[in-house]
Image (cartoon, helix red, strand yellow):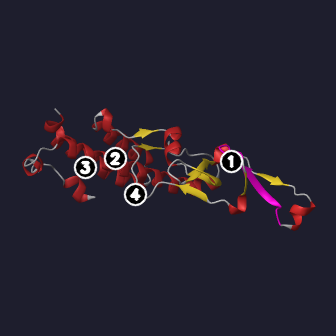
């Protein structure tokens, strides 16, 4: 039963977290990775952090949409067209249009089929706001040959380690919240050994 396992999981979590931090400090990446995997393994499957480049970059990508100046949605707001559905091209004007300043890049709205001038188009960018927790992180960086990689690898792997640890902290908090019952927080966790955490 998850509730009965919480004190043991918390004790192991504290120990592993301490080992992650020591591994980061000493540059012992194997220990850092092993301890992070240990924390992940403590959690039931539905709380585990996934490691996947494809899933992570799909979740964090910016959504870019172009606002059509000609057509509206049913609620009266401007139609927003995903950038992937739009092809921007240069409009080559005739002599009259050239005098009117009509030269420039344009795109055609796929909903209303009307030409939109890019410089008059409102571009809407939607991205995640910090802090965010996705339950997934990218693959850890790999060490390659060469001086340049040597100089940047440590920074990359430490950044990845913190990202993974932050996601695990969030998942652990959710697991605790979902499995505590009111009134037993102090009873269940009064005997947790925190000496490893305090000594780091």
Query: Pointer 2 and pointer 1: residues touching (CB < 8 Å)?
Result: no
Give whichever of discs 3 and 2 has the lower sequence position.
3
Residue 104 lies in the magenta stretch: yes
Seen at 38% across and 51% down, the residue is 23
User: Which circle, 2 or 1, is nearer the viewer?
Assistant: 1
Distance CA(mark 1)–CA(mark 3): 55 Å
Residue 58 position within the rendered picture, expressed as x and y whole percent measured from the top left: 52, 42
Give whichever of discs 2 and 1 has the lower sequence position.
1
Q: Could you tell me which quadrant the C terminus lies in?
A: bottom left
Residue nearest the observer in this picture, 139 or 92:
92
Name the side, left or right, on which 10 lies relative to 133. left
Residue 168 has which mark? Answer: 2
Residue 100 lies in the magenta stretch: no
Residue matched to label 1 = 109
User: Which circle, 3 or 2, is nearer the viewer?
Assistant: 2
SS type, badge 2: helix
Give whichever of discs 1 and 3 has the lower sequence position.
3
Residue lying furthest right in this view? 95
Q: Is residue 94 above or below residue 61?
A: below
Residue matched to label 4 = 131
Give whichever of discs 1 and 4 has the lower sequence position.
1
Give whichever of discs 3 and 4 has the lower sequence position.
3
User: Which circle, 3 or 4, is nearer the viewer?
Assistant: 4
Residue 87 position within the rendered picture, expressed as x and y whole percent measured from the top left: 73, 47
Quadrant of res 181: top left
Q: What is the magenta range?
A: 101-113
Instruction: Count residues near mark 2 (Cα–Cα under 10 Å), then give few for <14, some for 14-19, many for 20+.
Output: many
Distance CA(mark 1)–CA(mark 4): 35 Å
SS type, badge 1: loop
SS type, badge 4: loop
Residue nearest the observer in this picture, 188 or 133:
133
Residue matched to label 3 = 14
């Amino acid at each position: 039963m998850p509730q009965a396992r919480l004190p043991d999981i918390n004790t192991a979590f504290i120990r592993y977290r301490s080992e992650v931090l020591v591994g980061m400090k000493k540059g012992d990446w194997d220990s850092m990775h092993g301890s992070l995997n240990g924390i992940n393994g403590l959690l039931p499957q539905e709380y585990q952090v996934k490691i996947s480049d494809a899933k992570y970059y799909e979740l964090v990508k910016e959504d870019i949409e172009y606002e059509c100046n000609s057509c509206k949605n049913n609620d009266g707001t401007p139609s927003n067209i995903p950038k992937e559905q739009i092809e921007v091209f240069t409009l080559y004007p005739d002599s009259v249009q050239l005098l009117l300043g009509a030269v420039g890049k344009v795109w055609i709205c796929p909903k209303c089929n009307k030409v939109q001038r890019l410089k008059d188009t409102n571009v809407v960018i939607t991205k995640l706001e910090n802090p965010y927790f996705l339950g997934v992180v990218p693959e850890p960086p790999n060490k390659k040959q060469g001086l340049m990689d040597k100089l940047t690898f440590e920074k990359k792997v430490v950044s990845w380690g913190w990202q993974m640890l932050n996601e695990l902290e969030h998942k652990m908090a959710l697991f605790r919240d979902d499995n505590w019952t009111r009134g037993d927080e102090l009873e269940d966790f009064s005997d947790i050994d925190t000496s490893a955490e305090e000594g780091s």
